[in-house]
Image (cartoon, rainbow, N blue to C red):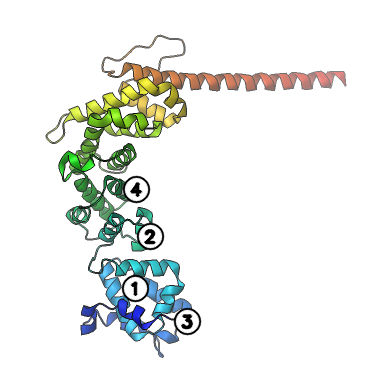
Amino acid sequence: MPGTKRQAEALVPEDSKKGSAKRRHGAQLADVQLGGFDSLPYEIRLAVVREIAYQPNRRDARDELANLLEVSKHVNGLILDDKALKESVAALQRNPNIESRYIAVCRDVVHGIPVEDALRQNGPLPKREEVRASEVDDALEDATPEHLANLADAFSARRGPAFKEALTGVAWAATGDGPGRLNSAHIGSLTTLAGAFTNIHLDLEDRDLKAANEAVAMQVAVRGDDLLPHANIEQIATLTSAFAGHDDSEFEDAKNFNDAMDKLASQVTARGDELLPKASAEQLGTMRDMFGGPEVQLAPSGAAFNWPAEADYPVAFAKVVKEMGNRDEAKRLAHDTQRRLQLANRDRSRDCAVER
């Protein structure tokens, strides 16, 4: 499918028409065989265009793609024939002066593109890139709490220094305007942010991530009575894990975490009978440890429970322990029932053998 002249011209920035060493690089790639780029097999031409479009430096990708368009009349057709390549080229045309793929993702998300689409269209995102947290923060000036939550979730799930720097930029954006930046955040966004800033593979002592997590805790501490009645058990368990065990330090106020934990414990106390049966075993274990402290041990069946001195949330803790005990008892009864059936079947088999 050949492209139009207007489509080709749209890909050519003005500064690329002046002729430089970088400007000629795409043309050099095109002349890899006698007869020029257009004489190469379709698969090779498509591979070359992809290689250019997917370069880590997106400005280089855009400029060299424009250079290739000057020497090949079929490049637009190649682009339009391939959905992923077409999306990538369209992403390069948006924000043409941005060199960082991470900044391009942030800009696209702020302008309404779903985060997974932005990641795909601006990808592949390199693990190492000269992206700075301050640049990410600047790109997120108009981001909503939901934008920040989605980006934090996406960046924290991946490994590499560039992803960590981008996540730090999101953390700065979440705290840059003080607590007010998150005042409109709903419980889903706050939970996603807390989970991202405390992702297990990150450095949880990182000052920027801890400060951002505190900003989320402050929202739960202040607005918890309005927010938490709408929280599900997964959100409560995630927030409990994110906020528990913080001490006073020079840059965080433990009261924010403690007040938020009090609000979470109150929800488990008030709604535990409804919420806890829906919890996974891992979520129950998390809440048991966080509400009871690291030294808590479940008492043997039928034994009195000895509360540790540091247990601050005894009612919530007791409800979690009770649910875990109910599940253990149900498993034991199911095992006993299965064992009885097995014994009964064995006895019947023996009786039949004797009769024969």
Helix, strand or loop status at disc 2: helix
Residue 206 occupies quadrant: top left
Nearer to us of marks 4 and 2 is 2
Residue 242 in percent (x, y) is at 29, 34
In the image, which is nearer the foreground, mark 3 or mark 2?
2
Q: Identify the residue at horizontal 88%, vertical 21% (top origin).
A: 356
Q: Please state if 306 lies on the left or on the right of 19 as rendered.
A: right
* Mark 4 residue type: Ala
Separation of marks 1 and 3 at Cα, in angstroms: 17 Å
CB of mark 3 within 8 Å of CB of mark 4? no
Q: Position of residue 120 (x, y in %)?
A: 38, 60
Which disc, if any, is residue 343?
none
Q: Amino acid at mark 2?
A: Arg
Say which amino acid is labelled 1. Answer: Ile
Which residue is denoted by mark 1 in the rendering? 52
Please tell me which residue lies in front, 195 or 130.
195
> SS of the residue at dot 3?
loop
Percent of width and height locating residue 52 = 34, 73
According to the image, label 4 marks what residue? 157
Q: Which residue is mark 2?
A: 120
Contact (Cβ within 8 Å) of mark 1 with mark 3: no
**Mark toward the start of the polypeptide (2 vs 1):** 1
SS category of the residue bearing label 1: helix
Residue 290, picture quadrant: top left
Cα separation, mark 1 vs mark 4, equals 27 Å
- Residue at image point 18% right, 40% down: 180
Picture layout, residue 313 above or below residue 215: above
Query: Mark 2 or mark 4, which is nearer the start of the sequence?
Result: 2
Which residue lies most toward the bottom here? 35
Q: CA distance from mark 4 to mark 2?
A: 15 Å
Left or right of 129 on screen, residue 285? right
At label 3, counting other C-alpha atoms closer than 10 Å, the crowd grade (few under 14, some 14-19, many 20 or more) is few
